[in-house]
Image (cartoon, rainbow, N blue to C red):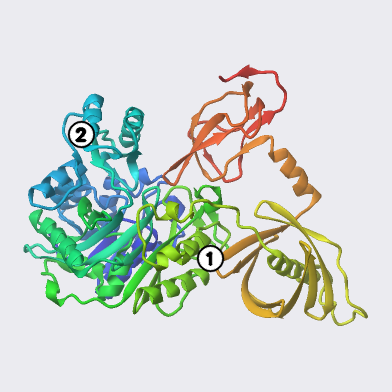
Amino acid sequence: MKPIKTILVANRGEIAIRIMRTAQALGYRTVAVYSDPDSEMPHVRTADFAVPLNAVAATESYLDIDKLIAAAKLSEATAIHPGYGFLSENANFADACAAEGITFIGPSAEVMRAMADKAEAKKTLRNIGVPCIPGYDGDDQTEATLMREAEKIGYPVMLKSTAGGGGKGMRWVEAPDQLGESIRVTRSEALKAFGNDNLLLEKALVMPRHVEVQVFGDNYGNAIYLGDRDCSIQRRHQKIIEEAPAPGLSSKLRESMGQAAVTAAKAIKYSGAGTIEFMLAPSGEFYFLEMNTRLQVEHPVTELVTGIDLVEWQFRVAAGEVLPLSQDQVNFDGHAIEARLYAEDPESNFLPQSGKIVDWQPPSDVGIRVDHGLLKDSVISTFYDPLLAKVVGHGRDRAEAGRRLVRGIENFVVSGIKTNRTFLIECLTVPAFDDGVMSTSFLDNNGLLERSVNLPDARDIAMASVLFHRRDVELWGGNMHGWRSRPWKAEPTSFDVAGQNYTATISETSCGFYIVHCDEHDVEVAVLSEGDRTWLRVDRLEKPVDVIWSEDALHLSQFGSNFVFRKHTKQTEQQNIVTNRKAIAPMAGVIGDLKVSEGDLVDEGDLLLTLEAMKLELPIQAPMGGVLSAIHIEAGQHVAIHQVLVEIDPATEGVSVK
């Protein structure tokens, strides 16, 4: 391999920027690659060079091995860092790099293949004494065999794709009568996602924790572990909150898990950063789950408690150096907790969101680290994962790290797109989290998935009323305060927010002071200073709010909440009535299966089509019964959020689709 001087980062967004910064600090030149939707994203200009991939879809850009190798040759890059996701665990990509004399910054292709198949990985590690969950991972994949083996294991069981990952290809099966259908559905999902429909069975652990160990190896047989992380708080098998060290583990258990992970890493001759994931039963027994042969999304928590730059270590090991530290030289400092900020709507079953970010102000509080790759006016597309940023709190202990993280999320201003900010704050502030009561059922056990629409209260409406009034005065009347002979009383004003309509009446008592009547409450509001961060006095309490105007909409953010206010008019009222007869796209995406034709008769709730975006397939149902009078889309078409897909006539004549 050639000496490493220029590194191409085969990824995008926050992880691309994070890798580039360490590479540049070490004196390497960096190369960005980008798809068409990402041409204006910050990672492109963070690099020293950039190469367009001239495509939209990930399969034709970030997942196209030939294009990435060509980009490396064009930029004279002698090494490629894959980041995480995309091709980071693709052995064929590592082979392609080796064939061109390009250093792949990660483990060997042989190791990746050995760990990629869950069944083979379990066999390998079971043979060297690493505890594995009881189950079946044999070659006989007939339904009869799987059903017979499930009876031997005992229900409940976990049914998994052997090539699975990212929460796909997994089913919890409670009883024998559920297994047959689960096998068929999981096979179909696995074949579509991974091109491999082989399955395995595992004993389903009740209320387990998901604890992983960070390992690091070099090319000379050395391997150490850099502590553990708890990743139990998950939704749809996707991690949401991670922390290091895992709370509540005894020193003996922590060391046993670490040593088991190192045993595994040494046995497979692992080189670079990797993670051994375990399931930890309430009894204290732990079992190997899988190995991720790459850098993890949650690696910042390990970096903060160890003081080690894991990406720097990746570069050094790839360049042929030995591990910088031995096991007894690794020290730990305090606690770190990471929360993943997503573009999604928790109030609509966590649907991914897309659109323009009209305001973006990451926090800069003490003890807060934010990894992101966005700017104000960045556009979140439907083509990639909806992760916006990782917010990490670090403190001398878990309580301090948690407080700092909550404050950081509250102070994170993001407007123009719905996020899970409020949901994250709720997760981090329930008593069970403070007590360290972790399990993969954390969200269900604490009622955090039972979402209700977050509605503004009278104070929110009052603040919005005053801000709209002052904007109207500025736009239409100038500053009228100087010549009025008596206080001004406004007509009632109606707002649409969070799908609801509110009416408020505002009375100006003196310059900058108002009384707003809303929802049977009188709220006193005084404007102390204005700007992006506006200070208001609301019922004697002075506080800052972040104010952004975009297309006549008011984005009002404060301490983790965000509401979008629009003036309610007769036109919007009529639009709401008309919308009830239309199926509207709840998110931007690609039309999948189209189940109906014009003239079909449907009942309310009938499946019309599927919409695919950001790793999610969403069924679109009829909002009312009637005849399909117009279909505005076709399979494979890209659609925007709120785009009209299908129109329904309430007439009863037509041909039933049933």
- The answer to whether residue 475 is visible is no
What is the secondary structure assignment of the residue under circle 1? loop
Instruction: Please determine whether, in this image, residue 154 is positioned above or below residue 390.
Output: above
Q: Nearer the viewer, residue 42 or 303?
A: 303
Q: Secondary structure at mark 2?
A: helix
Residue 331 seen in this snapshot: yes
Q: From the image, tell me which residue sits under label 1.
A: 376
Give the left or right position of residue 229, taking residue 624 as reference.
Answer: left
The image shows residue 536, relative to residue 257, as above or below, that is below
Q: Amino acid at mark 1?
A: Lys
Q: Is residue 551 left or right of residue 132?
A: right
The quarter of the rendered structure image containing the C terminus is top right
Q: Nearer the viewer, mark 1 or mark 2?
A: 2
**Farthest residue, direction right:** 485
Q: Position of residue 264 (x, y in %)?
A: 12, 56
Question: Residue 597, labelled with which disc?
Answer: none
Instruction: Name the residue: 63% across, 61% down.
Output: 563
Q: Which residue reaches farthest front?
A: 283
Give whichever of 293, 118 is nearer the camera. 118
Label tally: 2
| Pointer 2 residue | 152
Going 16% across and 32% down the picture, which residue do you hit? 139
Answer yes or no: do the residues labelled 1 and 2 have beta carbons within 8 Å?
A: no
Quadrant showing the N terminus: bottom left
Question: Which numbered disc flags the more N-terminal residue, 1 or 2?
Answer: 2
Where is residue 413 shown, x and y percent of the image? 54, 68
The CA distance from mark 1 to mark 2 is 56 Å
Residue type pointed to by label 2: Lys
